[in-house]
Image (cartoon, rainbow, N blue to C red):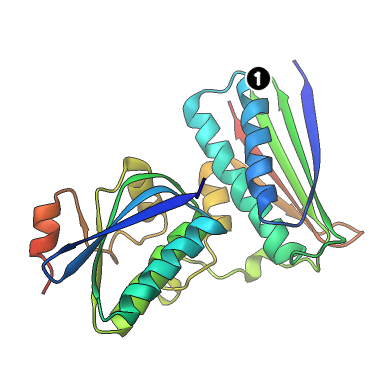
Amino acid sequence: MLTEKKLNLPSVIESVEKAASEAEKFARASGLGEAELFAIDMAVRESVANAVKHGNKFAADKKVDITFFSTDGVFEITVRDYGEGFLVEDVPDPTDPENLLKASGRGILFMNNFMDEVAWENPAGGGMIVKMVKKL
Amino acid sequence: MAELNISERQAGDVTILDLDGKITIGEGSVALRNAIRRLLGEGKNKILLNLGSVGYIDSSGIGELVSSFTAVNKESGQLKLLNLTQKIQDLLAITKLLTVFDTFDDEGDALGSFN
């Protein structure tokens, strides 16, 4: 079974909850179990929060594009922002002792931990695309 | 309905904050931050956070716990955690923060650990 859902959300904090709620509905309809639902919820919240806050910087004229895709054995989430982009290898490791007491910087760590694959792309139109895969 | 409800009680010179709800980006994190700052402003620097009814925390919420820990330590105080759910424990383990916080399953033990 192949299904897809797309969202186009404003760059506000409330979009995190909206995206998570839609992800849960879609994931439940796709037959995912509680453990998978929790992982997807964490990944969606962290990636959309990053897109809103760090990518689009809450700009009213920039949206966050989200796609949920489900097929046999795979659940994919794609989140795109229209900000300045960044190099993921430049993001400090939050588990490094010198970063342990920093107030932020753990979102990507959670995404990597809860999803089986996380891939980043700097698209031609600017911004960032992150694609996350959960193998079912 | 508020994302995070915080109620406060005193046990000697330790302030216990019973947290109920979510500590997430936005309202929840801000509520915790404001509560800690208020307590420090009142000179209350021995704080026990009861997380037993925190159903959800994201990376911003974890960051707020860390900020609170740092702020209290800066005031020569102590901030400790009580009743971590398994999920919160797992998140603190992922972030290597279990070695930073003093955590307890028993309130009596937690209170007895404050200097």
The foreground one among A35 and B64 is: B64
Chain where mark 1 sits: A
The amino acid type found where label 1 is placed reads Ala
Q: Residue furthest right?
A: A125
Where residue B65 appears, as percent x and y from the top left, is 39, 64
Counting from the top left corner in percent of width and height, residue A22 is at: 68, 34
- The picture places residue B15, in percent across and down from the top left corner, at 22, 66
Let me know if residue A95 appears in the view.
no
Query: What's the residue at 59%, 45% (across, down)?
Result: A43
Using residue B105 as the reference point, say whether residue A132 is left or right of it.
Answer: right
Question: Is the C terminus of chain A in the top left, top right, bottom left or bottom right quadrant?
Answer: top right
Determine the residue positioned at 86% across, 56% down.
A123
Measuring 71% from the left and 26% from the top, which residue is drawn there?
A70
Q: Secondary structure at mark 1?
A: helix
Return the residue nearer the eye: A103 or A76: A103
Q: Point out the image quarter for the N terminus of chain A.
A: top right
Q: Is residue B76 visible?
A: yes
Q: Residues within 10 Å of mark 1 (few under 14, many from 20)?
A: few
Q: Residue at x 52, y 51 (%)?
A: A110
Coordinates of residue B4 in the picture (x, y in percent): 44, 52
- Residue bearing mark 1: A29
Q: Residue furthest bottom?
A: B75
Judge left or right: residue A68 versus residue B45: right
